[in-house]
Amino acid sequence: MSYEFYKILHLFMIFSFLVLSVLNLTTVPSKMVKIGNGVVSFLILVAGMGLLARIGVSHGAGFPTWVTLKMVIWLLLAVLIPVAGKRFPEAGKKGTLVAMVVLSAVAAALAITKP
């Protein structure tokens, strides 16, 4: 599959993840929202790995630092959002929304600049 396909899939899944995360934190989430959040998180990873293959990151070498940082950020968000939605009080959920926006912006900046 082409670079463009993986990029569109990756971006669509990121937008879907953010929408589902907001639903998870601002409403009483249905079971489908919770399941969707996990499935979309996995598809973000799959599409991201496809993008890495298309830009020439080899299988045997370690990941560049920016990739490792992005993976840590998205893993943190993928775990934090469902926990916050279920366990945190309202103030904690609002703080989690702010953290989600900030961490997403950092992940986007890492992907764009590839430091």
Image: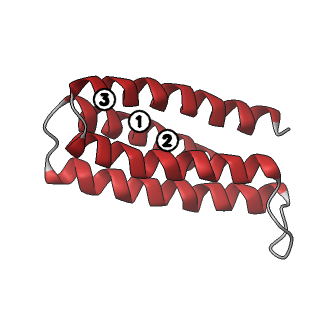
What residue is pinned by disc 2? 14
**Which numbered disc, 3 or 1, marks the residue that appears first in the sequence?**
1
Count of residue discs: 3
Q: What residue type is labelled 2?
A: Ile
Q: Where is residue 47 in the image (x, y as percent from the top left)?
A: 59, 56
Which image quadrant: the N terminus? bottom right
Q: Is residue 111 left or right of residue 39?
A: right
Q: Tell me the element at label 2.
A: helix
Q: Residue at x 30, y 48 (%)?
A: 83
Identified at 80% across, 73% down, the residue is: 59
Spatial distance from mark 2 to mark 1, Cα to Cα? 6 Å
Q: Does residue 21 sit above or below 26 in this rendering?
A: below
Kindly identify which residue carries mark 1: 18
82 sits to left or right of 54 = left
Of circles 3 and 2, the one toward us is: 3
Q: Which residue is drawn at 44% across and 23% down?
A: 98
Residue 75 is left or right of residue 32, and the answer is right
The residue carrying pointer 3 sits among few (fewer than 14), some (14 to 19) or many (20 or more) residues within 10 Å by Cα, namely some
Which labelled disc corresponds to residue 92? 3
